[in-house]
Amino acid sequence: MTAPATAGVVIVGGGLAGSLLALALRARDTPVTVVEAPPMAPSGGGAVFSSATAISYGALPGWPLAPTPLARLAAGASRHWRRLQTQHGDLGWRRLRLRLQGGPAWWPLPFAQVDTATLASRLPVALEAAGVTHRIARVEQLLASAAPGWRLQLGDGTSLAAGQVVLAAGAGCRQLWPGLPDGLRSSWAAVLELPPSPLIQGRQAAWLPARFGRVALERRAADLSQPEWLVDGGLVPRGDGALLGQHTLVRPGLELGTPPPAGVVEEQLRRCLADQAWAAALAPLPGRLLQAPVAFCTQGLPLVGPLAEAPGLWAFTGFSAGFSQVPVLAPLLAQALVAGGDRAAAARRRLQQLGLGWSDPVGADRRP
């Protein structure tokens, strides 16, 4: 039985990328359906699985992190977050003091953060108020239709059909479309979620490393012959508590693989933090380990735009600094998707100028 066509755009993935793109499309009066997979069940090893959005620091540096056009654009992300809050209410954006480990007491450059606890509670309300249709179901299969468009077979036994589909499911994108470029890969990330305590109360500031080792490890992913892990130190407020540290595990190849044992990851994370003077008193604090699969791109630039040899299929994934990059790119992608004519062409050119949409334009049809 053929699924009825869904008007507008179907977005696979209800995290930061999928949600902000949905809001940008609704601002253009485009009907949008977001299909979000149900949460991963806790494992027998004590792991608490979360989303990449929920375990993010939500950091928003007000200066370019690299000498690239995208980095310069992302430095203005706070302006986009303020606009979103004007339109949709509090989403957790706030100015925050920044302290760099090993640097000056306080960094004088502009810095802000999106509190992901507030975002998690407020974003579903904003999506509903904007008229976004929300489905909780796992997409089991993505098939090209005989007519132009796509059919999504869902885990609840139903299906959706749409002319335009956007893959914004992070580390889950490759399972749906194996023909994605090899530069898009995935890793396992983990943080410690700390409850309120005297040691973190009053620290309404972000304590971050001057340079994250995770970024360099991701760049080397294609050359790895065995799994590698590292720990970046960091502390940011989240709700009434905080997020501490970042554990990253990158494996060779394109497959995500099974989550690493939670006990091993937590021991590695706490041990590395205990060796850093600024975090020595924080490392033993009680807290729970949150793990999530994360998508990244070895080129350092996200995969944004139409996919080669797959008309109507788009990607919006692989962000290295999602809270800075997603809000500035979502309006551009929305324009490229639905504006039509010269405006859509202008948006595509702008994405190309930013170095995005780097899927292989040459070669055989990669449809599975």
Image (cartoon, helix red, strand yellow):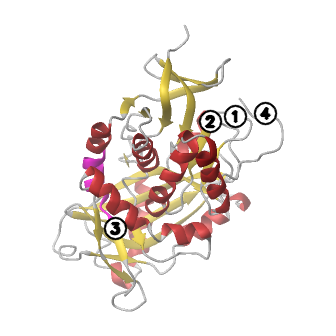
Q: Which residue is mark 4?
A: 365
**Contact flag, marks 2 and 1 (Cβ < 8 Å):** yes
Residues at marks 4 and 3, CA–CA distance in whole angstroms? 42 Å
Query: Compared to 351, does 136 lie above or below?
Result: above
Is disc 2 surrounded by few (<14), some (14 to 19) or many (20+) residues within 10 Å? many
Query: Compared to 69, does 307 lie above or below?
Result: above
Measured from the top left, where is residue 285 in percent x and y? 26, 68
Please tell me whether mark 4 or mark 2 is closer to you in this view: 2
Query: What's under tag 3, amino acid-wise?
Result: Gln
Q: Decide if residue 268 is on the left or right side of residue 315.
A: left
Query: What's under tag 1, amino acid-wise?
Result: Ala
Instruction: Verify whether residue 141 appears in magenta.
Output: no
In front here: 166 or 178? 166
Residues at marks 2 and 1, CA–CA distance in whole angstroms? 6 Å
Q: Earlier in the sequence, mark 4 or mark 1?
A: 1
Q: Which mark is residue 113?
A: 3
- The stretch in magenta equals 113-123
Q: Which mark is residue 310?
A: 1
